[in-house]
Image (tube, helix red, strand yellow):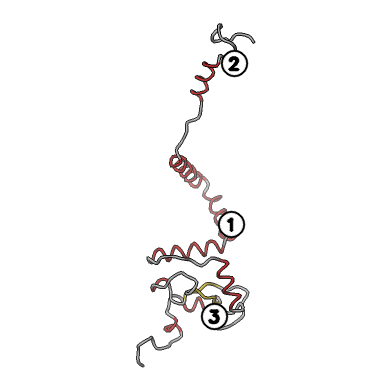
Amino acid sequence: MKNAECHEDRPDFKDGLCRGCYTRQRTKTRKPVFTPTEKAERACASATRYAANNPDKVKKYQAFWRKANAQKRRTYEHKRRAALNGVSCVGVSPEEFRAKCEEHGNRCWYCFSVQDILTRDHVMPISLGGLDNPDNVVPACKRCNASKKNKRLEVWLDLPLLGEVR
């Protein structure tokens, strides 16, 4: 083994340097170590820069993701609306909703029409204090769900409210 170029009295370790000099040089050129918080902040800043520099690409990808993940998006929206209304959110998973649809024979809970695509409807709307849980969610066709909006069932069906005399 030949002598290192840096210290002639020491044996060569790597790249013509002794072990001590090689370690010092490697320590100086080593990448900094970031905490998880710093890593997240750097990633967020990078994503923000990318979005600012590539708005068309970002818009195109978001549209693609929304289309490919429609059920996830709906679940997210339900949870977001529940949180905005101060309702504790249990949520209804896509599997639970599919099971509920099959339980009802893929029929709308309101008009009983058989549909390929059923939407979630909250019998007691979240905006009026209803919960986002399996007991309050029923399958509804788009037509019934759109016409009911955020009305209570009694109001939508034009029935007397509980305790009201007509």
Q: Amino acid at mark 1?
A: Phe
Secondary structure of the residue carrying tag 3 is loop
Q: Quadrant of the N terminus?
A: top right
Q: Nearer the viewer, residue 135 or 111?
A: 135
Q: Which residue position is annotated with label 2?
A: 13
Tell me which label, 3 or 2, sits earlier in the chain: 2
Secondary structure of the residue carrying tag 2 is loop
Q: Which residue position is annotated with label 1?
A: 64
Up the image or down, 108 lies above or below 5; here it is: below
Q: Amino acid at mark 3?
A: Trp
Residue 18 in picture, x, y percent from top left: 56, 14
Q: Amino acid at mark 2?
A: Phe
- Work out how far the residue at label 2 is from the one at label 1, CA to CA, in angstroms: 54 Å
Pointer 1 local density, CA inside 10 Å: few below 14, some 14–19, many at least 20: few
Q: Which residue position is annotated with label 3?
A: 109
Residue 10 in picture, x, y percent from top left: 56, 9
Residue drawn at x 43%, y 74% as measured from the top left: 125
